[in-house]
Image (cartoon, rainbow, N blue to C red):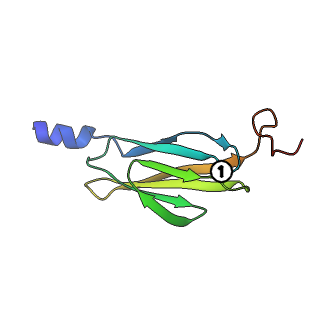
């Protein structure tokens, strides 16, 4: 009965991304996928503007100039898959970047 209760009470796999939503041009940044529930262990697949770019719970990249889409797809041991992501804004800060146009 305990196994049945555990199965019935199991929550669905969830994921969200921690990291900057706005970055400076050509800066190096790291994002972390935080997965919970479902059936660990988890596998991670990262996508930049729809193109596969890496695996693992963290993703580090250097931003270019245009804004970009960042998405992570997480799959658990039971083959459930979820994703999270959004647009990362690329903008410079004149007070910290002398190359930034005012």
Q: In this view, does 30 lie above or below 2?
A: below
Residue at left 60%, top 39%? 20
> Quadrant of the rendered structure where residue 49 is?
bottom right
Indicate the position of residue 52 as horizontal and vertical percent values.
49, 65
Q: Residue furthest top?
A: 95
Q: Residue furthest left?
A: 1
Indicate the position of residue 8 as horizontal and vertical percent values.
24, 41
Judge the density around disc 1: few (<14), some (14-19), many (≥20) Cα neighbours within 10 Å. some
Q: Which quarter of the rendered picture does the C terminus lie within?
A: top right
> Quadrant of the rendered structure where residue 36 is?
top left
Q: Which residue lies furthest to the right in this view?
A: 102
Residue at left 31%, top 50%? 42
**In the rendered image, which residue does mark 1 sit on?**
87
Q: Nearer the viewer, residue 53 or 4?
A: 53
Q: Which of 13 and 99 is in front in this view?
A: 99
Indicate the position of residue 17 as horizontal and vertical percent values.
50, 43
Q: Is residue 4 above or below residue 82?
A: above
Residue at left 39%, top 47%? 57
């Amino acid at each position: 009965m305990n196994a049945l209760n555990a199965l019935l009470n199991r929550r669905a796999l969830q994921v969200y991304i921690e990291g900057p939503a706005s970055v400076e041009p050509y800066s190096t940044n790291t994002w972390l996928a935080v997965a919970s529930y479902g059936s660990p262990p988890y596998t991670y697949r990262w996508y930049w503007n729809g193109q596969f770019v890496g695996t693992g719970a963290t993703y580090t990249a250097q931003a270019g100039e245009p804004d970009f889409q960042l998405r992570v797809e997480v799959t658990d041991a039971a083959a459930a898959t979820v994703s999270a992501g959004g647009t990362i804004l690329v903008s410079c800060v004149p007070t910290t970047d002398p190359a930034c146009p005012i």
